[in-house]
Structure formats: structure tokens, C-alpha cells
Image (spheres, coloured by chain):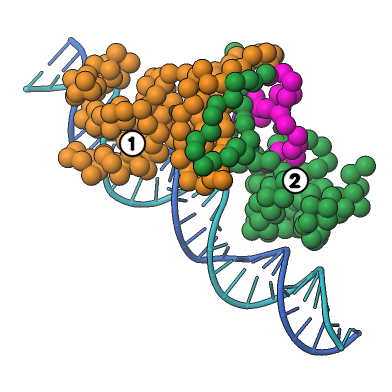
Chain colours: A green, B orange, C cyan, D blue
Amino acid sequence: MNSRENIVNKLKSAGVTPTTQRVEIAQILFARPQHLSAEQILKMVNKGHSTASKATVYNTLGLFAKKGLLREVIVDPTKIFYDSNVSRHFHFFNTDTGVLTDIPVDAIHIDKLPELPQGTESSGIEVIVRIKNS
Amino acid sequence: MNSRENIVNKLKSAGVTPTTQRVEIAQILFARPQHLSAEQILKMVNKGHSTASKATVYNTLGLFAKKGLLREVIVDPTKIFYDSNVSRHFHFFNTDTGVLTDIPVDAIHIDKLPELPQGTESSGIEVIVRIKNS
DNA sequence: TATAAAATTAGACAAAGTCTAGAAAAGCAC
DNA sequence: GTGCTTTTCTAGACTTTGTCTAATTTTATA
Ligand SMILES: [Mn+2]
Ligand SMILES: [Mn+2]
Ligand SMILES: [Zn+2]
Ligand SMILES: [Zn+2]
């Protein structure tokens, strides 16, 4: 399913040249829907057979996000989470454990959206439910 | 209205000893509803008559947040915003300008809240509408 | 006023992320 | 394939936000 061939095609379709490093990073990310930080990905890549530098990992994650292959989730003040699930959904963030979990889109209903400030357009609505262990 | 006396009482009511530095920081913050970063506050304090160290500013903001006098808003991966409006409301975040703006609570209607993961309790729902200049 | 506890400080330190300049790889024309 | 250009990758310096430490100062209390 997420064979190397599939990943290569996914990158090509998004207009991203499938280099060794990018394919390696993509294989880790797109293996399943998950939330990973840049430093986690850096470590995971360098445990595998090929390697990538810090700069390449950061550049690649930024590129993937720009091309819509990844979603950046900003909930933890110390690091960005990269979400390999780019379909519309929301998040729980457990402040005790630092774990991010998905909330299916239909589990929350939002209506009566606010009027945007003059001269701006929306680039997405985020809902974060902060939770703690009880 | 927000005289020194008022600020001192506000801190005392929250169980915070009103030291010189804390009162100075509080006067800046509670002058009006606003969203400020720690570094902005540090600069503002040290332009005034009294001063405070970096460690004290960070400690004070953390303490105020813990005591419910401030709300931390995490939308910008590079810094925390401290919101002097602790009443329930949501935010626009303009990714082009870095400016955070309030959305009144009644401008968004959320129902059908998700079930929380086992063994957790909610500590607040955040809605962030990311916007960009059009 | 004496003592203990709480708060402040300078500056070292940590961690995430950015930048630079050179090396390597990829793409392209022939 | 060869040469040439453009893109990508890299190590490591650097930046920024934020934390920590150990000594000093302030505040609370008896
Ligand atoms: Mn940070
Ligand atoms: Mn950061
Ligand atoms: Zn997600
Ligand atoms: Zn606000």
C-alpha cells in the first residue's frame, strides 16, 4: 500500500522531487496517521538505512506542509507537531503527557462562524481541546 | 480604575504577593485586554521606572497564568502570547502579521462536544481561526 | 529586631529552529 | 555519456525563547 513506489508518486503529484531523503522521511510519516515532531523524525530517519541532516529534515517538513502533504499543529509551546492526516479534523492535547489525539470532524459541530477582519481570508479553523489526567 | 491600588488588590485576591516587579508587570498587562509576549513585556517593564529581570518576568507570567490572572495562547510556534482577557473567547491569528485578535464567545457556536479520552478531564476548548491577508 | 521563607537577579544553559557556504545530486542539452 | 546548470543536501555556526542555578535581596513573622 504505502510502498516506496506509492510514496514516490505521492510526492511527484504534489510537485515535490522525490529525493532519497524526502522519500525516506515520507515513508516514516505516511506509514499511518500520526503526529510527530521534527526532532522525532530526525531520529527515526537516522535509525534507518539512509540518513538525513537536521537542515534537510526541517526543510523537508516545511516543504511538505507548504505542498499540503502535512499539517502543522501548534499546541505545544516547545515544538511543532507534523500531522500526516491532512483531512479536516480537530485535536485533544493532553498537557500532562504531551500526547496529541485526533477528534473526528463530526464529533464537534461548529456553526455561526465569525466575520473575518477586513482584507483577510481564512486558512483554516482549529479546535483544540486541552485535557489533563483526572 | 486600574490604579496601583486596584492592581495590588487584584493580586492579593488571587493569592499573589504584590511585589514591586509583579505590580509593575500587572499594570502593563491589565491596563487593557491585550495579547503580549514575554519578551515584549520584559522590554516594556524596563522602559518604565522600575525594572525586572528576564527570570522574574518569565516566573511572574507563569505564576499569573497558574493563578488564573492570565491566559496563555499558543498559536505562534516561536512564542507564547499572554492574554489579559481571561473571560471565555476565541482567536483569529493572522499568520502574515503575527497579530492575534479576539473573537467574542457568541460569534461561534459549538455543540456536540466530543467524548474525552478515559481518565482525562477538559481544561478548556480553544478555537483558532487562522487568517492571512487576501 | 532577629530569623526564616519567599522573591529577585545575572548569567549560564538548553532546545527548537534558521542560516550559510560549500559539496553532492539531479536535470537537461547536446 | 559529457558538460553545464539548477536543485538539494550537509555540517556546523548562529538565533531565539525559555529554564535553571546559586547568590542576594526583600518580605513575612515572631
Ligand atoms: Mn519555545
Ligand atoms: Mn521554536
Ligand atoms: Zn491529527
Ligand atoms: Zn484574547
Q: Position of residue A69 (x, y in %)?
A: 75, 46
Mark on residue A69?
2
Depth check, front residue: B60 or A4: A4
Question: What residue is rendered at 76% in x and 51% in y?
Answer: A25
Residue A87 lies in what quarter of the image? top right
Task: Output the chain of dot 2.
Answer: A
Question: What residue is rendered at 71% in x and 29% in y?
Answer: A89
Magenta stretch holds residue B85:
no
Question: What residue is rendered at 68% in x and 50% in y?
Answer: A66
Q: Is residue A50 visible?
A: no
Quadrant position of the C terminus of chain A in the picture: top right
Relative to A68, is B14 above or below? Answer: above
Q: Position of residue B21 (x, y in %)?
A: 24, 32
Q: Amino acid at mark 1?
A: Val
Q: Which residues are magenta?
A: A82-108
For the residues bearing labels 2 and 1, Cβ distance under 8 angstroms: no
Depth check, front residue: B58 or B111: B111
Magenta stretch holds residue A97:
yes
- SS under mark 2: loop
Depth check, front residue: B130 or B47: B130
Q: Which residue is mark 1?
A: B57
Q: Position of residue B39 (x, y in %)?
A: 37, 43
B40 left or right, relative to A8: left
Mark on residue A28?
none
